[in-house]
Amino acid sequence: MPTPAEERIHRFADAVTRRDADAAIAQCHPDVEFYSALASLEGEAFIGHDGIRRYFQSVVGAWDEWRVELHRVEEVPDERLAVTMTMHVRGRQSGVSVAQDVGHVWELEDGKLRRCAAFRSGDEALAEVGLDP
C-alpha cells in the first residue's frame, strides 16, 4: 500500500502525462523547486507554482508526446522519495520518439512536494537515498 507521499508522486506523474498543470501544482508546496532532465537541457530549476506552469509550457512547446511511466516510488525515513521512471517523448518538430530512464529524489515539506533533484538513471536516485536498485 503506497504512503500518502508516494500517492502524491503518482498524482504528479499522472498530471504530467495528462498535461494538467493545475493537478500537478495541487501536489506541490508553494516554494517547489523542480528539475527535469528532459524539459530543460540547461539544468534550469522550475521554482514555485509559476515555475511548474512554465515547465508545462516548455513540455507542450517541445513535445507532441510526454508520458511518465513510473517503475518504483519509495519513501525513506528522512521524508525523501526515490522515483525511478521512463520518460516517453516524441519531438514536436522532428517526430522522433525517445524513451529515457531517469530518476528523481523528492523532498517533502508540509506533506507536499518541495524539492526535486533529477538523475540520469533510476539507480542513481535510489543510491542517493541509500536504497538498492
Image (cartoon, rainbow, N blue to C red):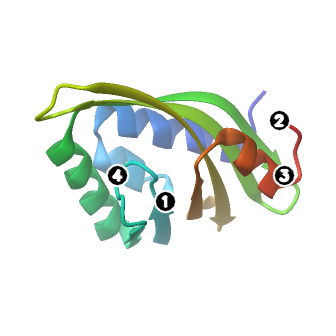
Which badge, 4 or 1, is on the more N-terminal residue?
1
Q: Hey, what amino acid is under mark 2?
A: Pro
Q: Which structural element holds mark 1? A: strand
Numbered disc 4: secondary structure: loop
Q: Nearer the viewer, residue 55 or 110?
A: 55
Secondary element at image label 3: strand
Asked whether the viewer can see residue 29, the reply is: no
- Which mark is first along the chain, 2 or 3? 3
Q: From the viewer's perspective, is the residue at label 1 or at label 2 nearer?
A: 2
Q: Do the residues labelled 1 and 2 touch (CB within 8 Å)?
A: no
x then y, percent, for residue 90: 26, 28
* Up/down of 52 relative to 89, above or below: below
Asked if 93 appears above or below 56 in the picture, the reply is above
* Left or right of residue 29: residue 46: left
Sequence-wise first label, 4 or 2: 4
Residue at which label 3 appears: 76
Q: Nearer the viewer, mark 3 or mark 2?
A: 2
Between the residue at mark 3 and the residue at mark 2, the CA separation in whole angstroms equals 14 Å
Q: Is residue 123 visible?
A: yes
User: Do labels 3 and 4 touch, CB within 8 Å?
Assistant: no
Q: Which of these two is toward me, 78 or 2? A: 78
Of label 1 and label 2, which has the lower sequence position?
Answer: 1
Q: Which residue carries the number 2 mark? A: 133
Label 3 vs label 4, nearer the camera = 4
In percent of width and height, residue 112 lies at 59, 60
**Which of marks 4 and 3 precedes in the sequence?**
4
Q: What residue does disc 1 label?
A: 28
At label 1, the amino acid type is Cys
